[in-house]
Image (spheres, coloured by chain):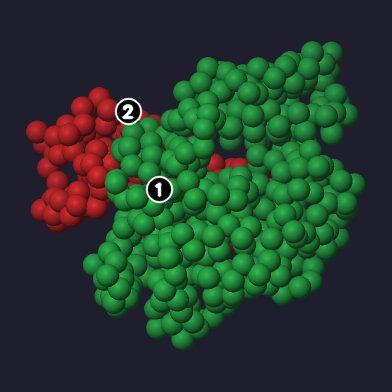
Chain colours: A green, B red
Amino acid sequence: MKECKIVSRKFDIDKSHTLAVAKEHGAYNAVLSAFELSSEAIIDIIRESGLRGKGGGGAPAGTKWALMPQDELQPSYLVVNCDESEPGTFKDRQIISKDPHLLIEGIIITCYAIKAHDAYIYIRGEYYQFQKILQQAIDEAYAEGILGEQVMGQDYRLDITIHRGAGAYICGEKSALLESMEGKRGHPRLKPKQKEPEWYFGNPTLVNNVETIASVPYILKYGAEGYRSFGTDQSPGTMLFAMSGHVEKPGVYEAEYGTSMMDYINHYGGGIHGGKRLKAVIPGGASTAVLTAEEAAGANLDYEAMRVMGSALGTGGMIVMDEDTDMVEALKNLLEFYHHESCGQCTPCREGTGWSDTLLGKVLEGRGTSEDIDKLLELADTMDGKTICVFAPAVAIVIRSFIRKFRNEFEAKVTQ
Amino acid sequence: MSFSFSAENLEKIEQLKLRYPSPKALSLPCLWMAQYQEGVISLDAIEVISELIDMPPMEIYRVATFYTMFNLEPVGKYHIQLCKTLSCALCGKTEMLEHLEKRLGIKPGESSDDGRYTLTQVECLGSCGTAPVMQINDRYYENLTPEKIDAIIDNLDEEHS
């Protein structure tokens, strides 16, 4: 397994979250060289590197950056998405607690590239103990003149403000996040037909995941080619993949895109806990289609390979299930999650998530019929493609993949 | 009105206003400050916030009721929030819940008679690699076992007495 430490290089160093130790290991080295380039040149480098967004969507970061205006007619903003609430995902918290200065460095370079002077880090409310570490790092940076009126002695102001969420998975959706940052409920916005930036109080805004921004210093230091020496042609670089559930050694382990899923699970995860057999893997956080053990055996951890299999890489957070797992209970668990987290704005989602949860509950209690299982698939169709955001389509994916691939378990619960 | 922000919080709010394009952005920060100050978010606090950030009280109320971490009803001194989502469920959450119910004598959604503990189940806390996990007030307790839970509760009981 190729060792790749693009983002996790300092994770195991004692006190890596402090400025002194971070600097010893190269923190902020990339910033001054970035300031020698033009902002457009930096955007070109990011585009060439093929850096893909690591919040779940995998969209090319450089393309998003290029949508930001360079004319400074209005203030531009960067919002770093640390809402991390996708079940099975726990990687961004590693960055903010173990190498916050890497994130700050990435923020400085990104803001310079998009001509933004204010950046916000939207962090989920539950991550308060990690937020404190991140705030401490920001305070250290201000004290050292790395942030503030003159970033590292340059004629460039940059302020970073942490904005704490308060418990809402949907606020990880970038338009809902911006609604929340505008002081409102986290209701996602309608998507425009043409490509344009996001908008914060009507100002052009870039929203990127923590890990995406944390990847930027490496790319500036080693160039697009350096980044592309990892991963595949279409999915270059590395990701903080993770494993949870029935593996021997759950956790976050950085690996290059294209790594075989089973190699990853066996090498870093130590295989299935207790020597059991693998039954299923959800590859990239709850909202991706579940894979059977056979499918997992042939799966590679990159965006294209996952899509070809009818699933998605998502956040790279693998949920591993062994042979004793009740797949009907597992689906019920996820449907409860979606039921609780639906923002309520769109009727098919608000009603569908509640109904499918209740319906599957009825099946689990032994009061279900075969029609109920088909009704669940019907509900998936009612939710899919008929709402403002992709939350409901995700629920549809989950319902369909579980029922289609493990139908016998659902039928076994049905009495009539 | 019976609620007012502390002088320290008022100063923080004024400083924060300088960081945002509009004071309306401060609904979440203000609600957090009010909750840490009072332990709960009261309608009086909502009125005060409304005036401070130029948003109608009903809008602030909408926001306070949308986000799960804002308590409009009082919770115990220690709010025990057990993660119930898939990875924790696969790694023994049910056993932890049973143990908590037995130890505290309450079920999810309930508070102990002395007001010391409130028990709830919450969705994914982002700690799946160290499941099962619970959050008590501002911090996580990971890699739970019944013995660890007892030690944690013993500690909290001692702190309280």
The residue positioned 86% from the left and 55% from the top of the image is A276
> Which of the 4 image quadrants contains residue B112?
top left
Please indicate whether residue B128 sits to the left or right of residue B64 in the image: right
Please identify, in this view, whether the residue under mark 2 or under mark 1 is nearer the observer.
1
The residue positioned 27% from the left and 64% from the top of the image is A157
Front-most of A112 and B67? A112
Please indicate whether residue A313 sits to the left or right of residue A187 in the image: right
Question: Considering only vertical position in the picture, is A124 above or below A242?
Answer: above
The residue positioned 12% from the left and 42% from the top of the image is B4
Q: Secondary structure at mark 1?
A: loop
Q: Residues within 10 Å of mark 1 (few under 14, many from 20)?
A: some
Label 2 lies in what chain?
B
Front-most of B140 and A377? A377
Query: Which residue is the extreme one toward the bottom?
Result: A24
Which residue is label 2 attached to? B62
Residue B93 visible to an observer of this rendering: no
Label 1 lies in what chain?
A
Q: Position of residue A105 (x, y in %)?
A: 43, 69
Residue A347 visible to an observer of this rendering: yes
Please indicate whether residue B67 sits to the left or right of residue A65 in the image: left
- Separation of marks 2 and 1 at Cα, in angstroms: 34 Å
Which residue is label 1 attached to? A69
Q: Position of residue A329 (x, y in %)?
A: 73, 35
Tag 2: amino acid:
Arg
Q: Are marks 2 and 1 on the same chain?
A: no
The residue positioned 54% from the left and 60% from the top of the image is A44
Front-most of A232 and A336? A232
Q: Secondary structure at mark 2?
A: helix
Q: Residues within 10 Å of mark 2 (few under 14, many from 20)?
A: few
